[in-house]
Image (tube, grey):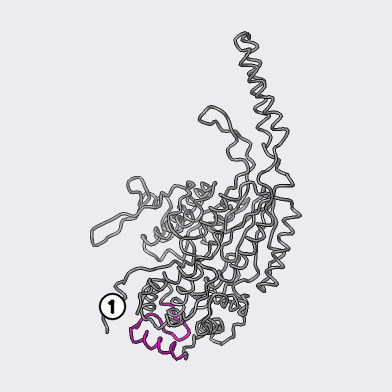
Amino acid sequence: MRNPKVVLNHLTSKAKSEQYVFERLYRNLYNPEFYLEAYAKIYPNKGSNTKGINEETIDGMSLKRIERLIETLKNQTYQPKPARRTYIPKKNGKPRPLGIPTFEDKLVQEAVRRILESIYETQFSNHSHGFRPNRSCHTALKEIRKTFTGTRWFIEGDIKGFFDHIDHHVLIALLRKRIRDEKLINLIWKFLRAGYVEEWAFHKTYSGTPQGGIISPLLSNIYLHELDKYVERYTLRYNKGEKRTHNLVYYNLASKINHRKGKNRKEWAVLSDEEKSKRLKELKNLYKELQSHDSKDLFDPNYRRMKYVRYADDFIIGAIGSKKEAEQIKQNLTTFLAYELKLELSAEKTLITHSKKNARFLGYDIRVVRDWHRMKMPNGTKKRKFNFQTKLFVPHEKYINKLINLGALKIGNNNGWKPMHRSYLVHNDDLEILRTYNAEIEGLYNYYHLASNVHVLQSFRQTMKYSMIKTYANKYKSTVSKMIIKHKINGKFGVRYETKDGQKIAYFTEQRMEKNSEIKRASVDTVENTLIYGGRTSLIARLLAEM
């Protein structure tokens, strides 16, 4: 059998030609190596031991089990079992459906996902960031910050119930554009129509890809790639003009300054100190007036630009143009999604926001700043450095609601903050309590560290610290002051604990809440789908040892 890495690299090289149509892909599913590597990837995942409909988990996996699975694929008797449907709470409090496939189905989905990803990843848009290798919420946000400069209108896209309203026939038609292999197409049909189990009653799935499915995010990107292509074509038509026209007021002032400077150079030697002081003051006032104007005409009707970023089913457009044009963009998107992809763009939630106000995307507030303050440059001149740049901000209600939801904060009378003990943690040991708080604080910072105002999370950390101390006090029926004294180690709050190498100390986090544009991890997303072409692991070796 061919090494999966070689197979996938070959598919990727062929996929670079958009006209290439793939055949005989299904036969790759007869290769045990694909399932061994899928097993190695899925095994460490914390959900891998979650039971599917048939109560089977990864426990008991063997090479014979894989061989039996391959045999059912060869004779096409393989039938995915209905995914067990569970619900996880969304941020707005509403339940999000999550379909949990059985373990054999996870293996097959992972093998198919890798094949499809090798074909489609190279053609996906650079503006698409969700569920893709080496991309994340942070890469999407950094693109916005870098490319949305000067935006006048934000269009915040909201597709109603996207994951549960993907039209199966549209999706299959899109797959058939590049894949001429009905065995593989039929297998994907089986996954789409496997249904789900809710309270142990079987239901058919007429639309949507189960959100707990391994293959679902990739199928979603294949579906919404059509939206990406449409927006790219729209952008080419919308964009207009090489650059904005000059602002005559600005350039008249600049001309006047240059004339005064030239005159000063000629006459400086014969001027009195009083006249020199007067002329310098005049120049200073002219410079100040100049920098209160824009060098370009921001309302130039012959200059238009449109930028677009998508993360899964959330997208945002930045338009340089009129509000009427922004409304037309929204209307055209609504029509395209309805007729081409059978999706509904929410009229109420798809907002058109002026860029001086906050737009919301991926939990961040986004705003184009109007900053008229001047900064001294290295050459001694003053310049407006940040005007019309796009900035990212932590929304205040995000960390306040986080504190309330964790039970660490109670809002009292007159909106006063009162840190609270968390009763559901008091039965944990001291180290677990400390590490729980540290993980929650560092997790929030790691997500919002791109924000210009990330320093506001110092209030979050401080409130969490007092909540933690109160939790210890409640656990030991003591007081806050006594807990501070008890846990003061080297001037910091810490907990001593024993290991096989002796006693160690864990300290309360000193994470500095500073802006940091570096993306330390490839992804901070809840769901990660990265290509893994690694060598054989000990898990694979253990399975092969059974032969």
Residue for point 41% across, 58% down: 472
Q: Nearer the viewer, residue 477 or 229?
A: 229
Residue for point 40% across, 66% down: 427
Magenta stretch: includes residue 64:
yes
Q: Position of residue 494 (x, y in %)?
A: 35, 52
Locate the N terminus by quadrant: bottom left
Q: Nearer the viewer, residue 265 or 485?
A: 265
Does 169 appear above or below 465? Answer: below
Q: Position of residue 507 (x, y in %)?
A: 36, 52
Q: Position of residue 133 (x, y in %)?
A: 46, 64
Residue 393 visible within the image: yes
**Identity of the residue furthest to the left in this view:** 501
Q: Nearer the viewer, residue 258 or 356?
A: 258
Callout 1 amino acid: Arg
Q: Position of residue 292 (x, y in %)?
A: 67, 33
* Residue 246, quarter of picture: top right
Image side of residue 528 versus residue 339, left or right: left
Specify few, some or many for label 1: CA neighbours under 10 Å numbering under 14, 14-19, or 20 or more.
few
The residue wearing badge 1 is: 542
**Region of the chain picked out in magenta, as a range:** 49-75
